[in-house]
Image (cartoon, rainbow, N blue to C red):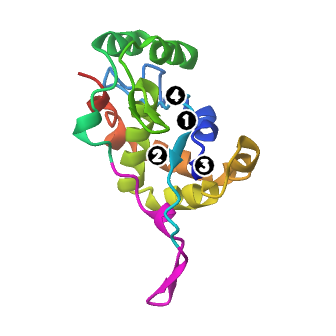
Amino acid sequence: MKKLALVGILSVLGFGCGDDDGGRTGTDSGLTLMDSGTITLPDTGTMMTMDSGTTSRGECEMPLAALPAEVLPRCSAETATCISMATSNAALQACFDADMTPPFVEGDFELDCGLCSTFQLISCGSNNGCGAEWADWNCCLEPCADEACAAGCNSFRDAFVTCIQGLGATCQSADASCFP
């Protein structure tokens, strides 16, 4: 199994651009990712291939698709209210941690409110101008099975974070589908 260690990005993307209201007021770009653990993806056995003279790194360079409607929403209206009043990243994390919406579970994959928000923001960034930065970071993480390995990808993570921050309002409401 390949691990996509979201833990590393959360330490950097647990940020708010402008103020820390999670973007719910519409006055800033409010991008925030919360600590939601690790996504485990199946090993597809994808091999490096040549295509028109360019080297493909495989599926890791593909943009992350948004979550399907069947697994949404994953957060409660109460959590949205809590997030709108949060004034720090710690308060935002407390809002996500307190969410009582049952997670979507399939095999080893567990999608809770915080991971839903994180996933949708990464999807937005990887599909709206930060695809190359996403591919660099995700392909670096692909062989990682622990946080020590993932730490070696921090420069790619930081480039992805900087790119998403530069998108401004484009991904401000990327996680809206996680809420009712």
Image spot of residue 68 (x, y percent): 27, 42
Mark 4 residue element:
loop
Taking the view exactly as shown, the residue that stands out farthest to the front is: 107
Disc 4: CA contacts within 10 A as few (<14), some (14-19) or many (>=20): many
Question: If you read the primary sequence from the N terminus, does the residue marked by circle 1 or circle 2 appear first?
Answer: 1
Does the rendering let one see residue 144?
A: yes
Disc 1: CA contacts within 10 A as few (<14), some (14-19) or many (>=20): many
Q: Nearer the viewer, residue 24 or 58?
A: 58
Q: Nearer the viewer, residue 100 or 168?
A: 100
Q: Which residue is mark 1?
A: 13
Q: Is residue 169 left or right of residue 118?
A: left
Q: Quadrant of residue 143?
A: bottom right
The residues bearing labels 4 and 3 have C-alpha atoms spaced at a distance of: 15 Å
Can you tell which mark lies on residue 157? 3
Foreground tag (2 vs 3): 3
- The three-letter amino acid code for the residue at tag 2 is Ile
Q: Which residue is mark 4?
A: 34
The residues bearing labels 2 and 4 have C-alpha atoms spaced at a distance of: 15 Å
Relative to 13, is 49 above or below? below
Callouts 3 and 1 close, C-beta under 8 Å? no
Mark 2 residue element:
helix
Can you tell which mark lies on residue 164? 2
Relative to 175, is 155 above or below? below
Point out the stretch of residues depicted in magenta: 47-65
Foreground tag (4 vs 3): 4
Image spot of residue 6 (x, y percent): 57, 40
Does the rendering let one see residue 132?
A: no
Image spot of residue 83 (x, y percent): 40, 15
Callouts 1 and 4 close, C-beta under 8 Å? no
Question: If you read the primary sequence from the N terminus, does the residue marked by circle 2 or circle 3 appear first?
Answer: 3
- The three-letter amino acid code for the residue at tag 3 is Arg
Magenta region includes residue 59: yes
